[in-house]
Image (spheres, rainbow, N blue to C red):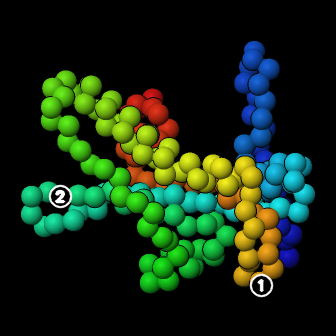
Amino acid sequence: MPLPRHSYCQVVVENTGFSHSLCAVDNSRDLAQKNVEKHQPDTTVVPVIISTDKTQTTLFRNKAAYPVYMIIGNIPKDIRRKPSCQGYILICYLPTPRLDHITLAVARHRAVANLYHVCMCKILSPLREVGISGIEMASGDGVVRRCHPLLAIFAGDYPKQLLAACVKTGE
């Protein structure tokens, strides 16, 4: 029976002296755990998964909403993937303004992108503070541990992933 192992790949960018390891999500969680334990021993990293997707709210007049959901990565996949288990929690709805008063399409797109980033920054600001300082949380076995919730994954459709990464389509 083969033993589990950690796999890493080394990336070196020529002529810059820049080198780092790229890892899978599980391995990056281990690296984050080691980094947090270096400063505060006996702590646990809690990976946070944020997801959003456009949802039609009515059958007529093309009304839509963008709910933002959150779940922690320590929950098993078979529970995370079933809506009936209610692993995800709704944390907010993103605004969907048309901004018709802005006549230039490029300026309108930039304004909507800026609004998205301001909203996500406001939504995730408590997570930033708690991720640095940590919080006491009870685990499934009842033991209280010092936990550091860190944003691990943003799951969204392709345009929202591009918007979150601050890149244009095709770059």
Of 104 and 21, the residue lying toward us = 104
The image quadrant of residue 79 is bottom right
Question: Which quadrant is home to the N terminus?
Answer: bottom right
Question: Which quadrant is home to the C terminus?
Answer: top left
Which residue corresponds to the image point at 26% horizontal and 25% vertical from the top-left?
106
Q: Which residue is mark 1?
A: 141
Is 6 situated above or below 14?
below
Which residue corresponds to the image point at 63% horizontal and 76% vertical from the top-left?
76
Which residue corresponds to the image point at 28% horizontal and 58% vertical from the top-left?
65
Which residue corresponds to the image point at 73% horizontal and 76% vertical from the top-left?
138
Is 91 situated above or below 160?
below
Q: How many other residues sit within 10 Å of disc 1, few (<14), some (14-19) or many (≥20)?
A: few
Q: Amino acid at mark 2?
A: Lys
Q: Amino acid at mark 1?
A: Asp
The percent coordinates of residue 128 (x first, y second) are: 63, 49
User: Which of marks 2 and 1 precedes in the sequence?
Assistant: 2
Q: Which residue is mark 2?
A: 63
Helix, strand or loop at mark 1: loop
Can residue 28 be seen here? Answer: no
Position of residue 38 in the picture relative to residue 10 (left or right): right
The image quadrant of residue 116 is top left
The percent coordinates of residue 40 (x first, y second) are: 87, 53
In the rendered image, the residue lying farthest to the top is: 15
